[in-house]
Amino acid sequence: MNPVVKILNTIGDVYTQGAKEILEEVGDVDYKILTQDNLLESIGEYEIAVIGLGLSFMKDVLEKAEKLKIIATATTGLDHIDVKFAKLKGITVLSLRGENDFLDTITGTAELAWGLLIDVVRLTPWAFDNVKEYKWEREKFRGHNLYGKTLGIVGMGRLGKWMARYGKAFGMNVLYCDPNINLSTSDVDRLWKRVEFGELLARVRALLRRPATLVGTEIKIKDLKIDLAKRRVFRGNREILLTSKEFLLLAYLGRNAGAVLTREQIIAHLWDFAYEVFSNLVDVHIKNLRKKIDPGAEQKLLETVRGAGYRLRSDK
């Protein structure tokens, strides 16, 4: 009878049943969550170690691994393993590095990143806390649309590409910088726009310098003040009375001050239904809003950009 192969699984008992069955066909499996000290004490009895991140298989551990023949790590990085010393000891290291066909099906990290991003731009955590207090202050937590915004990605590897795909699906402009992309053999540049890292930083700095500021529930642009909580608007010392839809339109323009918003973006944000592109619905509201906030002011803030859309000026 062949001796039973002993397998250490340091990821623990969270494996799916199918994965457990495969491992248990190979040998006798111990599912253990270990500390580094525990690992040093017990590694000597195992022929195979199935590991993730959290434990280091460096020289001190490998020296005690007298029976170890295989380390299988469910990672692409190998910083937690002394690969050279393992090779000297005749230990085979198996990882996910280079398994691109399989890795391209693993979207969890990119999906989590997008979930967090959406939470931030749509103000979801704050709205959730507000509802838990038995409030329904919807206008405080409208957030921002992603459509038409710019997504900057540093490093167009596997995760970068997934982030770019999702960004494109939201109708965003995707920019990336990655000196390791070979433009002669990659279709990345056909799908997304490549820029130098310096340009990406310059765009971020420009956004940070934008003079429209949101402080709590208040937007200030020059002498225009929009109080989101009390739904009041002032131009200097003059209070401006707006209809509900005019207020929402001004708040949307204010949150995106300096950026041109298309008619389609405004309709999608304020009316939540498909509307004829050539309707003058937006034009009428802009005209009425302009009459209320700009007359008599030395500097006109509400601007029509011909062929593009509308914006609140934020230049100094």
Image: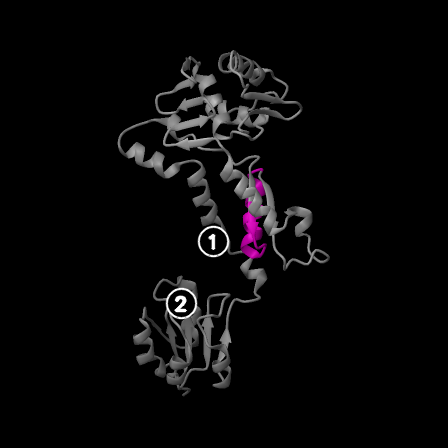
Q: Residue at x 42, y 81 (%)?
A: 59
Of the two numbered discs 1 and 2 in the rendering, the one whose residue sits closer to the viewer: 1
Neighbourhood count class around disc 2 (C-alpha, 10 Å): few under 14, some 14–19, many 20 upward: some
Report the quarter where the N terminus lies: bottom left
Give the magenta range. Answer: 152-171
Report the quarter where the C terminus lies: top right
Query: Does the image show residue 5?
Result: no
Q: Position of residue 277 (x, y in %)?
A: 62, 22
Q: Does residue 42 appear to the left or right of 105 in the view shown?
A: left
Residue 36, quarter of picture: bottom left
Q: Position of residue 265 (x, y in %)?
A: 56, 28
Q: Residue furthest bottom?
A: 1
Residue located beneath label 1 in the image = 109
Neighbourhood count class around disc 1 (C-alpha, 10 Å): few under 14, some 14–19, many 20 upward: few
Asked which secondary structure carries label 1, the reply is: helix
Q: Position of residue 14 (x, y in %)?
A: 36, 62
Task: Tell me, yes or no, whether the highlighted magenta stretch contains residue 211.
Answer: no
Q: Position of residue 132 (x, y in %)?
A: 28, 34
Q: Residue at x 67, y 50 (%)?
A: 189
Q: Does residue 53 appear to the left or right of 146 in the view shown?
A: left
Q: Amino acid at mark 1?
A: Thr
Q: Amino acid at mark 2?
A: Lys
Residue located beneath label 2 in the image = 20
- 130 over 275 or under it: above or below: below
- From the viewer's side, name the closer residue of 179 and 99: 179
- From the viewer's side, name the closer residue of 49 and 38: 38
Task: Tell me, yes or no, whether the highlighted magenta stretch contains residue 156.
Answer: yes
Query: Does the image show residue 245?
Result: yes
Residue 223, quarter of picture: top left
